[in-house]
Amino acid sequence: MDFEKFCRENCVERRGTGTLKWDSLQEIFGDADLLPLWVADMEIQSPAVVREALTERVKHGVFGYGKVEDEYFDSFFAWQKKHHNVELAKENVRFATGVVGSLYAAVRAYTKEEASVIICPPVYYPFYDAILNTGRKLVTCELDNDHGYYSLDFEKFEKEIVDNKVEMFILCSPHNPVSRVWSEEELDTMFSICRKHGVLVVSDEIHQDFTYEGKPFVSSACVKGGEYKDILITLNSGSKTFNLAGLIHSHVIIFDGKLMEAYDAYIKGIGSPEVNLMGITGMGAAFRGGEEWLSDVKALILHNYDYMKQEFARELPEVIVTPLEGTYLSWIDLKGYVPGDETARFIQDKCRLACDVGEWFSVMAQGYIRINLATDTKNIKTAVASIINNIKERLGE
Ligand SMILES: Cc1ncc(COP(=O)(O)O)c(C=O)c1O
């Protein structure tokens, strides 16, 4: 694949178009003049089929309340079956305006105030908010880190659950930011511990379509042939997959009748909106015709990752780049060169980059940065060169 050509034809200027990533730098980082590699969306235009479907909708010119037609269910279900071997029926699916909102909904629907909810840092920071902002008790079980490769210590996990009388586990699968694609065996062990202690599992699978060679994604619903469906709430969307986050449309998937009843009762109680017309239109088109686009985008992500990894290996061999199993986010340990408590300022003030920094994901993760790889290769080249040059300058080279 000609990556330069792909970027030329598919990546667009976003600054000045009302985007969080490019136009909120002043508010978020206190500096508007940074290269943004933070929040998880892309500079790559969504598939042509999506843009065409949305254009047709706009041409129609009426934006009244939407209805989810069978065509949408058919394309979503076919995607899930083909790519993840998940069999869905309409009664298993509810729509929502985003996965983060659904995390809050799940916490509120299934636990009472002060209940303990466990997460495994370093992890996507809104997981903390969904627990703390709803008045629940935060319990953490840090992942173990073996030279950039992360895993869960199951004994420690079980002990935290028992000691804190945990009622809910929020799982990130694949795991942002450490890029793990959990194996069926790992998931089975986590879930059997959860079952043993009456813990419900909320599985955030928003990154499910970003896994790479040799690391197949296993949906929580498929573990042991569906054995844990009765303790499971799955959240997903095509929003990461096809770069549609601004259309605020996502899915809540529940197989167990009682769990669905409780979810419906909670949603009824807050008068939540039903569906987003543009979300349905865009995502439905993407599930029908976005496969080839996704495969090109994944190739570009891998290309950017390989470039970055090789440059660091050659120029700064003590930079630890976590293996890219899943997501399009790269987790990088700079502690070999920059003290942990200086990394955030170094990356921003010296390197002129806006990255998510380790401490956003865990109190233990100072010294790490997360780089969004789903962008024009030239942004990755600029970022890598800046990090290398500035570290070398620090070293006096
Ligand atoms: C693990 C995870 N969950 C949820 C989200 C955001 O989901 P939404 O935009 O649907 O709220 C992200 C975005 O980066 C994410 O990484």
Image (cartoon, rainbow, N blue to C red):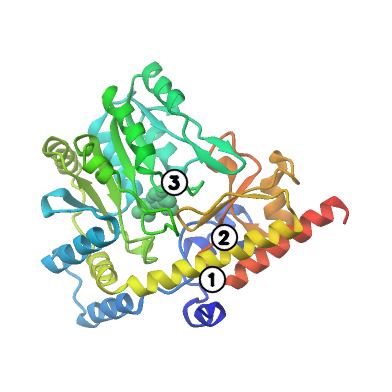
Q: Secondary structure at mark 1?
A: loop
In the image, 61 versus 196, the foreground residue is 196
Report how far apart the C-alphas of labels 1 and 3 lie in the structure: 29 Å
**Is residue 65 in view from this perspective?**
no
Residue kind at label 3, given as amino acid type: His
Report how far apart the C-alphas of labels 2 and 1 lie in the structure: 13 Å
Q: Residues within 10 Å of mark 2 (few under 14, many from 20)?
A: many
Q: Residue at x 29, y 45 (%)?
A: 102
Q: Secondary structure at mark 3?
A: loop
Tell whether label 2 touches label 3 (CB within 8 Å): no
Of all residues shown, which one is farthest toward the front? 214
Q: Residues within 10 Å of mark 1 (few under 14, many from 20)?
A: few
* Residue 267 position in % (x across, y down): 19, 43
Reading the image, the residue beneath label 2 is 37
* Residue 270 position in % (x across, y down): 20, 42
**Is 68 placed left or right of 188 in the picture?**
left
Q: Residue at x 59, y 34 (%)?
A: 364
* Residue 223 position in % (x across, y down): 28, 42
Q: Residues within 10 Å of mark 3 (few under 14, many from 20)?
A: many
Residue kind at label 1, given as amino acid type: Arg
| Numbered circle sitting on residue 15 | 1
Q: Quadrant of residue 269?
A: top left
Q: Quadrant of residue 297?
A: bottom left
Which of the two labelled residues, at mark 3 and mark 2, occupies the earlier sequence position?
2
Q: Which circle, 2 or 1, is nearer the viewer?
A: 2
Q: Which circle, 1 or 3, is nearer the viewer?
A: 3
| Numbered circle sitting on residue 175 | 3
Of all residues shown, which one is farthest toward the top? 163
Residue kind at label 2, given as amino acid type: Leu
